Image (cartoon, rainbow, N blue to C red):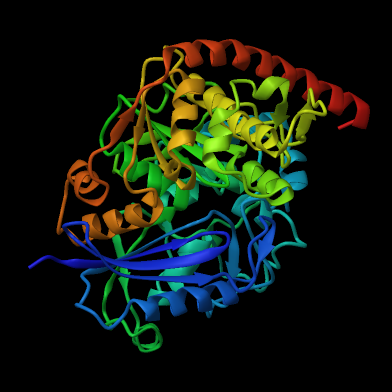
């Protein structure tokens, strides 16, 4: 008989839970909108926990599962000794404490970033620990990621998976351990950071209280889990070093398995892989799908057929999507979006197509940084992968084959993969990729359109750099 697992995907707008078996069949699914949507800066962790428990109740009552795993967005949740949240919790865009980190000087920051595998200082647990307005040291017992907070509330156990730990800036990612010496130099209380665990490790079991509320069995093994983008990338990559993974959502999160962690491309983030002893280079690109969605909300719906009719370059209309700053590979937090070359004949289809092209150009910058040879294919999943014309557009702009996932929701499926690996029911991630996702379908670039987009990408990149510099000069940023 097939074993069953519970997978949870905590997104910025909704929580999803599912029951899947070892054959990859979806047996139950529940979606709960976030009661207070996460805008990126802060959120209420108690409310998030209620949403997760409601999603778990929605998939309970079936066959007895062998494990549960959660994938969630990055962020910071401070808790007291009773595992209750202290103050507002920080989301992926939380900038509290960055000023205090910067004040420690370039030399210290350089050593920290080298060990953390990060190209620049960012918010997160370490920054919050250094900001007295963000974390009250007298109240706080531990500082966790949102996913690790949920695991703690379900099991009573404190832990940080190695990938979430990497996003704190406090971890030495190559050693998969807290950077104790540098933290002591910064007078950070290391005891506030929980023990690290591998994403596939069973770290606790469901408490009697959590079981009563969710309807799941007491003692259900809970796997450590990981950040949403990293979990989806982990499933897409499996053990393959000859592909690049792209999980496209509000942002595109890209990654490539590294043979050695020191072979890190310039500007890339270094994370532990979901596989023990392996590493992934890449990062989130910044607003891509989110920029398309923003323009769609302004101009209305346009049929895919009409969008596909717009020629490469959108008849001279160019959009820069960096409304919330550029991330990998440029790391320009103050970059902002722009619309260039607009003429009266441009309509809604031109605007949306230009936004889609901008997302693809942004992705190309990231992919080319991970593979300057231009030869590796890109495994493509996420919301944008549902559109055949977007998949073709991306293949054309990238000038590479696209390996299209038949299952877009790789974060939820990736959480199921971690649960199955943690339970020991399946030990091969490549086998899990096959049964959970299926066969990736290759989308080849159109030769003529790819050549044209190669020219357009050079122009787009020049305009982006020039506009970013002009905006910075005009605003003093």
Quadrant for the N terminus in the image: bottom left
> Left or right: where does residue 26 sit relative to residue 209?
left
With respect to residue 17, does 430 lie above or below? above
Residue at image position (53%, 24%) is 364
Looking at the picture, does residue 162 appear above or below residue 34?
above
**With 108 as the anchor, is 281 left or right in this view?**
left
Which residue lies at the image location 47% right of the left edge and 11% below the top edge?
448
Residue 68 image offset from top left, x and y in percent: 31, 67
Q: Position of residue 261 (x, y in %)?
A: 40, 28
Please indicate, yes or no, whether residue 177 appears anywhere in the rendered image. Answer: no
Give residue 313's quadrant in the image: top right
Please tell me whether residue 238 is drawn above or below residue 458 in the rendered image: below
Look at the picture and state if 79 lies above or below 190.
Answer: below
Q: Nearer the viewer, residue 181 or 170?
A: 170
| Residue 78: x %, y % from top left | 60, 66
- Where residue 228 sits in the image (x, y, percent)? 45, 52
Q: Is any part of residue 321 visible from this angle?
A: yes
- The part of the image, by quadrant, that contains residue 90 is bottom right
Q: Quadrant of the C terminus?
A: top right
The residue nearer to you, when weighing 141 against 16, is 16
* Viewer-nearest residue: 417 or 410: 410
Q: How many marks?
A: 0
């Amino acid at each position: 008989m097939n074993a069953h697992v519970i997978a949870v995907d905590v997104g910025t707008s909704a929580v999803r839970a599912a029951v899947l078996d070892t054959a990859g069949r979806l047996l139950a699914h529940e979606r709960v909108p976030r009661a207070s949507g996460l805008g990126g800066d802060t959120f209420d962790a108690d409310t998030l926990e209620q949403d997760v428990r409601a999603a778990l109740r929605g998939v309970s009552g079936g066959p007895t599962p062998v494990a549960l795993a959660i994938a969630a967005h990055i962020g910071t949740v401070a808790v007291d000794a009773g595992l209750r949240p202290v103050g507002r919790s920080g989301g992926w865009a939380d900038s509290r404490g960055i000023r205090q980190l910067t004040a420690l000087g370039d030399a210290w920051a350089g050593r920290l970033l080298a060990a953390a595998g990060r190209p620049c200082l960012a918010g997160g647990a370490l920054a919050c620990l250094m900001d007295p307005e963000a974390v009250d040291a007298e109240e706080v017992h531990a500082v966790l990621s949102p996913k690790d907070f949920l695991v703690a509330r379900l099991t009573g156990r404190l832990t940080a998976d190695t990938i979430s730990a990497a996003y704190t800036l406090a971890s030495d990612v190559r050693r998969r351990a807290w950077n104790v010496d540098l933290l002591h130099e910064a007078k950070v209380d290391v005891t506030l950071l929980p023990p690290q665990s591998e994403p596939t490790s069973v770290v606790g079991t469901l408490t009697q209280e959590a079981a009563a509320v969710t309807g799941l069995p007491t003692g259900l093994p809970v796997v450590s889990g990981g950040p949403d983008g990293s979990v989806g990338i982990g499933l897409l990559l499996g053990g393959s070093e000859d592909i690049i993974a792209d999980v496209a959502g509000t942002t595109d999160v890209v990654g490539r398995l590294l043979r050695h962690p020191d072979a890190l491309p310039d500007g890339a983030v270094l994370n532990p892989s979901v596989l023990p002893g392996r590493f992934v280079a890449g990062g989130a690109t910044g607003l891509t799908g989110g920029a398309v969605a923003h323009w769609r909300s302004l101009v209305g719906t346009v049929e895919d057929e009409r969008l596909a009719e717009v020629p490469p370059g959108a008849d001279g209309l160019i959009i820069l999507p960096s409304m919330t700053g550029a991330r990998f590979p440029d790391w320009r937090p103050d970059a902002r979006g722009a619309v260039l070359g607009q003429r009266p004949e441009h309509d809604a289809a031109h605007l949306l197509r230009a936004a889609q092209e901008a997302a693809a150009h942004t992705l190309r910058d990231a992919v080319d940084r991970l593979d300057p040879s231009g030869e590796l294919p890109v495994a493509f999943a996420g919301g944008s992968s549902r559109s055949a014309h977007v998949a073709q557009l991306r293949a054309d702009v990238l000038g590479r084959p696209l390996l299209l996932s038949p299952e877009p929701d790789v974060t939820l499926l990736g959480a199921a993969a971690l649960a199955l690996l943690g339970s020991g029911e399946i030990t091969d991630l490549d086998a899990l990729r096959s049964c959970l996702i299926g066969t990736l379908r290759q989308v080849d670039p159109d030769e003529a359109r790819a050549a044209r987009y190669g020219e357009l990408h050079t122009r787009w990149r020049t305009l982006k750099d020039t506009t970013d510099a002009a905006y910075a000069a005009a605003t003093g940023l």
